[in-house]
Structure formats: C-alpha cells, structure tokens
Amino acid sequence: MLRSHAVHGRVIVHADLDCFYCQVEHVRLGIPTSVPLAVQQWDGLIAVNYEARKSGVKRGDRTTAAKQKCPQITLVHVETIGADDELDDAGTRHDKGACKVSLERYRTASFAIMAIFQAHCRRVERASIDEAYLDLTEEAAKLCQEVEAGNARDVADSPETDLQGTAGHRVDPTNAFDRALLAGARLTAAMRLAVEQELGFTVSAGIASNKVLAKLASSINKPNKQTVVPAGASSDMLDTVPLRSVRGLGGKLGETVVSWSKAEKASDLKRFSQQDLVGNFGTKTGEWLWRACRGMDDEPVAPNLKPKSLSVCKSFTPVRDEESVLNWMRLLCTELSQRIAVDREAWSRRATKLTLQMISLKPGSRANQRDAGGGNGKSNTSTTRSRTVDIPGGGESPTTASLVSEAMAVFAKTDNALPCSRLALTAHEFCGLISGRGSIASFLRALPPPPPPPQQPMPPPTSPLEKWGSKGVKPDAKQALAVDPSGQAGGGRSLPEGDDEDVPGTETAEASIGPRDVPRVGSKDDSRVDRSRNFQPSSHLAGAACDERTAPSPLRPGYERCPKCGKVLAPEDLQEHLDFHYAEGLQERYTREGDVARDMAARMSDREGLPKRKIQEAGGGKRAKSQTKRPAAGLRIDSFFKPT
DNA sequence: CATGGTCGCGAG
DNA sequence: CTCGCGAC
C-alpha cells in the first residue's frame, strides 16, 4: 500500500482502563462515579476510584483505614466462590478461610472492551485485564491519506477530542510522523468514545511511536484522557520520568540499575555506553536499556487477545493433612473447569496441560518471616514447586472431578508437600478442538450450510515479541536502529506519575457490600433493546471486528468507502460518517460482540457439567443461585451481570 | 506484619 | 519443564 511516508515510524497506542475494577462495579451496580468507591478483597483494597482517592484512600489500604479516611466510601467485595458464600446480607460474609475470589466479572468486561478495540484496530495486544497495546500505523496512514486527499478534516484540527500535546510541546504539523500520530490520536479518541458509550467505561491512552513511550504517556493524564508524544517530545519526556517507572524497571532490575548508575530519570542512563550496560546487565538487558532510555523500542504489538494460560490459585493458612488440601483443590478445580469450558466456547480451543504449583513450609519453620535489608528476600521458610502433566482426555472438556484427581495424584507424589500454604493450577498449551464427530465443533458445523471458514480472529502473529526478563532483552538489532523516529529532542511534560489506576491483579468479583438493595443494573440504560441478534457460532470478538477489506472496488478519486457499512462517501463526510457510526451504529455492532461477553458471563453461572447441548440451560446445575436465565434481548454490559 | 490472585516471559 | 521476576 502506498505508505512511503508512513514507514517513518509506527503509531502505537497504549490503552488503559481507569481504576478498572471500580468502573466495572460502578456499571454493574449503577452507582455513579461521583460516589467514592473501592473494591476489596478480604480486608484489603485492590482498586480505588478517583473520588475516593481524593480522600487519601489508596490501593492496599485496609478497609478500616479506608473508612476512617473516607467514611462515606462504598466498599464492594470481589466475587467469591465456595462455601455457600451466598447471602452476605448486611455484613460481609466473605470467608477468606473457605472461599476463593473469582475475577470472572472483570474478565468478561475486559473482553467486551477488547472487542471494541479490535473493531477499531486490526492489531490489538491484550496486555493485561485492563490494558492493551494497539498498532494503528496502517489506520493512521490511511486517515492521513484521506486528509491529504481533502476527504477529511486536517488531523491537526481535532477539537472534539481531548487530545493533548505533551507539556508545552506543540505537535509539528509539518512533520509527517507527527501528523500520523495525530491521526492515530483521532482514531483513538473515537475508539475511547465508543467504549464509553457502549459499555460505560472510561479509558486513558497514550499515543507514541512505540510501546514504552505510549505506556508512559497513558499515565500522564490519568483519568479519561489521552496524551500524544510528538516526535520531538520523547527526549524531554524521558528527562522527567523516573527510571523506575519505565515498564520493566519497576522491580529488582530497576533497583539494580538505579543503584549501579545513580540515574534518577530515565534519560540519565544515556550517559552510559552500550558496552557498559551490556557488560553489567547482559546483552539483552543492556542493549534494551541503551535504547529505552533514548526513547527507542521496537517491540512489536503482538496481535493477540487470547490468554495463553488460565490459572487459579489460593493461599491459605498452612494445612498439614491431605484432606484439607483436597478441599482447596476441589474449589480450585471447580473454577478452573468452568473457565476452561468458557474458554473453549470463546476461542474454540482446549488446554492440554495442567500445572500444579504448591508452596510448602519447610521442615523447621516458624510462623514468622522477616526480611531485612532488601537484598534478596526469600527467608527460607517455604519452598515452591511445580509439576506439569497432561490433562486427561486430551483436554476435551475436563470435569472438575477429573482435574481434582489429576491434581491430587500429582500432589500425593510430591514429597514434603505437606505443610502447604498455597496451591495454584494452570491450564495451558492450547490447541484446536478435535473436530471429530460428536464434538461441538462438528455439531455446529453441521447445522448451517458450510459456514464460512472460521475467520481468523487475529491476524497471524507476525513476530515473536521479545521481552526482557530478569536477565536481558532481545535486541534483534535488525530493524532496531533502522527505524525509529522518536529519538529527538523536544519539549517534555511533567510526569506526575503518582498512583496509577489499575487493578491489582486479580479479576472477578461478586459480592457487594454497599447498596445491598440495588439491583439497579440498567440505570443508564436507555433500554435500547435490539432485535437483530443472530448467533454466530464461533465468530467471536475479533471475528466480527477484523477488517476485511477484501475487494476494494474502484472509487472515484477522493471518495472513500466506509469500512463499516461500505457506503461510498464524499471526502469531508467520511470522518463525520465514522463518528456517526460510533455514536449510533455502535449499538448494532456491539450487540454482536456483546454476545460473546454476555455469553461467557452466562456460562459462568452454570456449574460444570456443561452438556454438549446446544445452548446452556437455565438454572445451570446450581441450586442456590437465583439465576434467572434471561433471554437476552439487546443488552448492554449491565446485562452481563446478574441483577441478583 | 502481610495485599492477594492472575498473567506472561525468559533463563537455566 | 521448572523457577523466579515483573506487572497489574
């Protein structure tokens, strides 16, 4: 494609949901974000909304401390499973000693959001439950072409978005790459708007030439804002950013690098030669550091929305008998089997391996573990071990029982596992379903006429992304030096950095404390019930979202075809037309994508069994749950969550 | 005193 | 495949 100038650099976006877990609860419970709210897990807060932060409530605070700081705060406990956790009336009946948390609620919302991202960009990498990287290079180049052809408003003219330049730095409108970034910013703004209108979640974003910069940028203007890093601003930005806040340098490596170099800001590392860095931190890490502090990073956005593994874990007060271990194991396996089933339907794949990890107390251990002088911790009071086995039956719909027996068999074979304080199970190494007769795949395939070849949700993974572990970074010098526009100087912006939003790391929640009586799920819902919902067996998120510009028919010069509806539009109408889609046609598209998320949520409520029947039945094997099966009519995210 | 619970990656 | 790190 004509992109002789887009080749100057990539347009990378880092999209970050603001205090995600809190937002999910706000939407689910219909609580306005103006009320201070936090999500708790046992006695600690794992997410705090912006209103509550004003009172000084922070992530990690104890609930009592939170209430002292902010008496009016609403606390919502994450969903828990196990030990008849039902009825948590007035109080909080979340028994840490008998339940485990479930993050499914947040995963569901996460995938719904990712689906929208995917609808706006063909290259989306789900980086975590609430973050994604997008490569908008192509889309931005295309928009630039439109602008040049006079078919769209100039990219520098985007007043409707909350686009912001990095502190004091004005984007250079004569710089082709800056224009590409601006185009990306416009597209990003539209995408964020879609997420907010369709699901009710606000997103912050950073738009830059690579992942490292985009990530730093997204945190600059936190709640619900986006920040662009113009070509000339990256250098100054790194002058203000603490080294430790660069992705990958927040832990031990960063600590080591700082103490070794005395660098405070990221750019301070520029004073060291590449050899110096390599000599001290190894080839990969050294070369990566050398480049990163210069605002260079060529790590590709790896198109991928699917999780690579599914894991469940639980830490508990040490148990010494296998009986107790079995109980925890059952709980873990119950959740894992359900998640495997959901994953299977969502991605048409099966996990083939199971890894059991356990932490056991060492022989002569004390109930104490203190570590001073943070060199390297691990007071040897416990050991962690893991063992991997094949999932029986090739991973075809493993039942809770089968997982339990497998896991317990492994556990039993492990010596000194006994005083056990933590168990973790991971299902991984996925592969396609065996399309034999009897399989769901063939079942679905049999009904309608030959369904179109399962459209590849994601574009094929282009290149193995390199990561830096505790050791080093894979430089892949190839295109490293060649392409990278962002090394210049320019203006910078203060980088408050403060507390990030985000989720602690877990994901699902259930119990609610605050407004116990508020099934007010569809508060904002304009009840735009949709009718046209036809099921598509396996076309999930990406499927529908991907671009399929297959046959570009000849258009009159200056005219463009709307990628959404195919309509041919006049030059200046295109942008408006696209915005229009987001503001309106979105409901339609979302309806489709929503199916997946809602579907997942619905399934989560069924107990295992998961009959190979077509659709899941109401009141899935669970007795207590008052799961009123709702026939889903057009629904919004609210509907994913059970009202009560 | 101590946040868990999930994820992904790379070194060994 | 196992272990540890880093991040959310």
Image (cartoon, coloured by chain):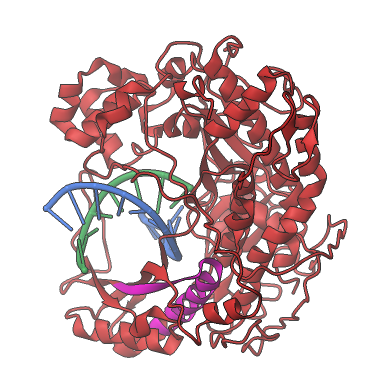
Chain colours: A red, B blue, C green
Residue at x-position 73% and y-position 18%: A150
Q: Residue furthest front?
A: A554
Q: Nearer the viewer, residue A108 or A64?
A: A108
User: Residue A34, can we see it?
Assistant: no
Give the left or right position of residue A558, taking residue A236 as reference: right
- The spot of residue A290 in percent (x, y) is 27, 24
- From this view, report whether residue A8 is shown above or below residue A77: above
Report the front residue among A482 and A36: A482
Q: Nearer the viewer, residue A640 or A10?
A: A10
Determine which quarter of the picture holds residue A538: bottom right
Residue A565 placement (x, y as % from top left) = 76, 45
Name the chief secondary structure element in magenta.
Answer: helix
Question: Which residue shows up at 62% across the image and 31% down it?
Answer: A226
Q: Is residue A191 visible?
A: yes
Q: Could you tell me which residue is drawn at 30 percent across and 88 percent down?
A: A322
Answer above or below: position of A75 versus A446. above
Residue drawn at 71 percent across, 60 percent down: A592
- Please give the count of numbered marks on the rendered protein: 0
Q: Is residue A84 above or below residue A287?
A: below
Is residue A592 within the magenta segment? no
Tell me the quarter of the picture where residue A475 sits: top left
Quadrant for the C terminus of chain A in the image? bottom right
Q: Position of residue A254 (x, y in %)?
A: 30, 35
Give yes or no for residue A339 being in the magenta stretch.
yes
Percent x, y of residue A493? 53, 18
Q: What range is drawn magenta here?
A: A329-356
Q: Nearer the viewer, residue A581 or A311?
A: A581
